[in-house]
Structures are given as C-alpha cells and as structure tokens.
Image: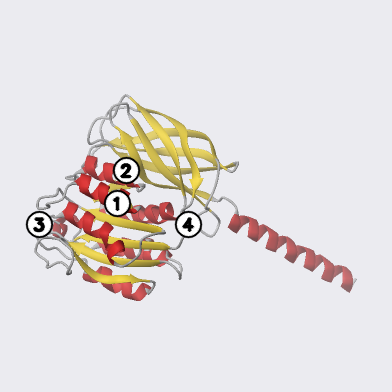
Amino acid sequence: MKKRVVLSLFVVAALALVLSACQTGGVSSLSFNGISGINAANGTANLSVSALDGSGKVIGSGTLTVPTATVSKVTDAFGSPVSTTYGATATICGSITTTAGDLRAMITLDATGSMASSDPSDLRAEAAKSAFIDRMSGSDQAAVSSFDTGTTPTSGYQAIKVYQNLTSDHAALKAAVDDATFAGSLTNLWDAGVDSVQYFANQGVTSGNRVVVLLTDGLDTSSTNTPSDVISAATSSGVKVFTVGLGSSLDSTDLIDIASQTGGTYGQVVDPADLSGLFDGIFNASQGSGCVQVKFSPVPTSGHIITGTLTLKVNGTPVSATYQVSWP
C-alpha cells in the first residue's frame, strides 16, 4: 500500500510540474503594444502585438491567425465621447519575431514647463520605473535623460541632459528617472530625438537591440533638427524609436512617422495614469512582436481615439487584448 501511495504522489507531482511548465511556457495572453504605422488616407492602422506566457514573459516567435477587431468606444482628443460609429476588419501584417541581443535603451523624458500641468503627480516617472526598468533582465541595460531648453545639455549633445549612462543597476536607473522628472522650459523635442539616437554611437554601442523611448506632452518649439532628421539618424544606425505622447496637443503625425519608419511604436494617452500601459507595451515590443492591420470604416476623423478589442490565435491559442488608436 505504501508503494502505491508513494507512486501516486510521484505521478501527481510530476503532472503538476508538467502543467506548470505548460502554463509558463505556452501562450497565455496578448499585449497590444502601440501603433506601428497609420495610413490616414485609407483608414488603416498597423498594431504591434506581443504574446506572453503564464509568467508574463514575452514569447519570441509565433504565428498569428484568425484576427478579428471590434470597436467599443470612440472619444475626441480630450476624452469626451463622440457619436461616430466605426466598423473594423483585421488582417495579419507580420508574425511575431524577436530582436537578437540584450536590450540597450535610452529613456528620454520631457521635462518642459507644461509637464507641471499635464503630469503634476510625476506619473511618467512611475511608469518608466515600474513598467520598464523593473522588467529588465540582469543583462539588459538602460540610460536616462531629459530635455527642455532651460537645462544645460550634457557635453556633446544639443538638448538632452544625461542623468545615468548605460547600466543594469535598477536602483541607479530609478534614481536617474526621478532626477529627470521636473518641469523646466521650452520644447526641443526633435533635437532630443537626434541626441538620444546618437547616444549609442557615442557610447560605442553600434549593434544589437538598441531602442529609444521618447516621451513628450507637446509641440516642438525650439529644435534646429526636424522629424526627418530623427528618422535619418535612427535608420542609418539601426536604432528603433518608440514615441510616447501625453495629452492632446502633440505632433502626432510626426511621432507616428518616426516610430513606424524606425521599427518602433507610438502610443498616446490623455491621462498620465495610463502611461504605465504604454511603457509596458514598449518593453514587450522590444522583446518580440507581430503586426495586425485594422481597417476602419469610415476613415476616422482626425483627433478621434478609437478603443476596441483585438482577438486572434497565436500558435493556435486564442487570445485577445484591448487596443487604442489615436487618429492623427
């Protein structure tokens, strides 16, 4: 009898281990990461998506099938409901793939004067720390900078002040994010974008999984560079730029172009409390992502924010996620 009991317990334990492994390693959920491209003329938006396992780890490869999209809510740029009704159809525009190499990220935060009103509780700092830095592995590294015209840039740069060079030290990175979070002067966004891209070459990091996370809450007012200069710098060096917009007064078309042409994503929120979701999506996309194209009918009106549900199968497993598209 004892042998049977011991054997039964062994079988149960072994089965539990197998089930646990399946739950951790298999597809468990879907992440909407942001917009990877928009065609404003024909009403299509390319959405970046990632698949996560049971532990929340991004799955590096996967086949996407049977996509559908629905629209549940439409608001204006200020979050007020609008009466326009949109239909949505979805097609696959890219299977899940990953970028080889450990993450090397430059987190560049807007520290202009308008941040005093757009993010009075400094939630951009909390988002960068909890949804990005805390998710970095021991071999990943990040750097932290801010931009505004009233702060003297670090030597060798036009706009950014670097508070922390590339490191895997989470505590040091979080302290740097706190230092970079304030409300200063005017907006030199495009200069900061070029600086952030060029930072890697200046540090001798010229290959691998290099990304810039560029957050802003307003229109560029003071740069000598243009969005085309940011794109040129990034594409020539192989750096992906992920752009984050906070609020309703943004150069959204340019921010989308920068993201889409460099391999990044764009996300926009009105409420700074929602920034964590954008940073979470950026981290997911930096690890592995695919593409779903959603076509809206009629063509969305500029300024409309469309929220809905995206459903598909990843490697045969059905998953879904809420998406949000801010139409430029």
Which residue is tagged 2? 261
The answer to whether residue 246 shows anywhere in this view is no
Q: CA distance from mark 1 to mark 4?
A: 18 Å
Q: Earlier in the sequence, mark 3 or mark 2?
A: 3
Q: Earlier in the sequence, mark 1 or mark 2?
A: 1
Q: CA distance from mark 4 to mark 2?
A: 19 Å
Which residue is tagged 3? 186
Q: Is residue 136 depicted above or below 279 in this figure?
A: below
Q: CA distance from mark 3 to mark 1?
A: 24 Å
The picture places residue 225, in percent across and down from the top left corner, at: 15, 50
Which residue is tagged 4? 100
Which label sits in the foreground, 3 or 1?
1
The picture places residue 139, in percent across and down from the top left corner, at: 45, 69
- Specify few, some or many for label 1: CA neighbours under 10 Å numbering under 14, 14-19, or 20 or more: many
Residue type (three-letter) at the residue carrying disc 4: Ala
Which residue is at the front of the view, 118 or 171? 171
Q: Secondary structure at mark 2?
A: helix
Which residue is tagged 1? 234
Q: Secondary structure at mark 3?
A: loop
Which residue is at the front of the view, 166 or 69? 166
How many numbered marks are there?
Answer: 4
